[in-house]
Amino acid sequence: MIFFLLLTLLFIVSYLEFWQGRGTENYYISKPIYISHRGVTKNNPENTIEAFKEAESLGFQGIEVDIIASKDGVLYCSHNHKLDKETNHSGYIDQMLSDELDNIKTGFFSHPDNQQRVPRLHSVIENISNDMIINIEIKFSSYFDLSTTFALRRFLRNNKTKHRILISSFNPLIVFFSRWLIPSTRTGFLFESANMKKWINFCHPDTVHPRIDFLDENIIKRCKAKNLPINVWTVNSELSIDKCKRLGVHGIITDLEKNFKLTTEY
């Protein structure tokens, strides 16, 4: 009995402490890379095909896209489960069928003269070149909601893509299960409070995504020890970009619309 308890304790300690991020070298051709947060939204609603295409045309190396699975398991690009936050419809994406969702347009409040269909993830991937990194943030309605995670697993099994896929979430359970259920991709743990950092050793992400105000020397040192690249969000000022560069982060997630084709420096 004592031997079993000691063995269990050893396993727990090893799991929490003696691990490393998996290789992500092919994700970071340059340093830092710039990732467009929900696409470029000056002329188009967020999380739409046109917003992502504009980001690519401006020279972004990646896009960040939010996804939610419909009731029948189809993946849609939306930041909110609740439709009335972005459309003139009511209801929740995860409680509706794809036949209904395919006819709904987003941008009702932000771009009333340029509303566009809430796109399926499949359509976004088809319209973005293979060179682009696609950072997929999995949204969830509750802590134990893994419906979108399993839907994404099915989607990637059935739809082979050459894109470099990075799966991220604020939910450590989603990051944990994504690492083991979808091993062909890499994972990222998003956090926006000091208290959330404790989950890093539980979910074993391949990258860490701190909010800009939680980026400091301590998290840089911790991530280096675990071979974890850092992608920072949402970096929307020259001062913040300079901070990221000074600390040597790998990715900058931003709402900015600068033409990154013109320069590697901001």
Image: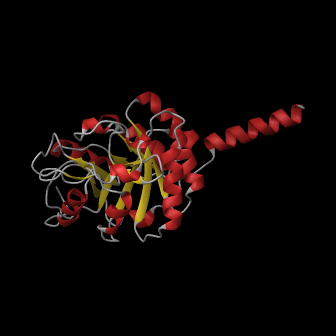
The residue lying at 45 percent from left, 39 percent from top is: 140
Q: Which residue is at 44% across, 54% downward?
A: 74
- Quadrant location, the N terminus: top right
Task: From the viewer's perspective, tell me whether residue 36 is left or right of residue 2.
Answer: left
Examine the rendering and report whether any part of residue 23 can be seen: no
Report which quarter residue 50 is drawn in.
bottom left
* Placement of 115 over or under 185, stated as above or below: above
Picture coordinates of residue 148, whole percent (x, y): 48, 47
Front residue of 99 and 220: 99
Q: Where is residue 26 in the image (x, y as percent from the top left)?
A: 42, 67
Could you tell me residue 159's position as x and y percent? 47, 68
Image quarter of the C terminus = bottom left
Pick out the residue farthest to the right: 1
Q: Residue at x 55, y 52 (%)?
A: 179
Q: Which of 252 and 173 is in front in this view?
A: 173
Q: In which quarter of the image is residue 209?
A: top left
x then y, percent, for residue 186: 48, 57
Q: Is residue 25 visible?
A: yes
User: How many marks on residues?
Assistant: 0
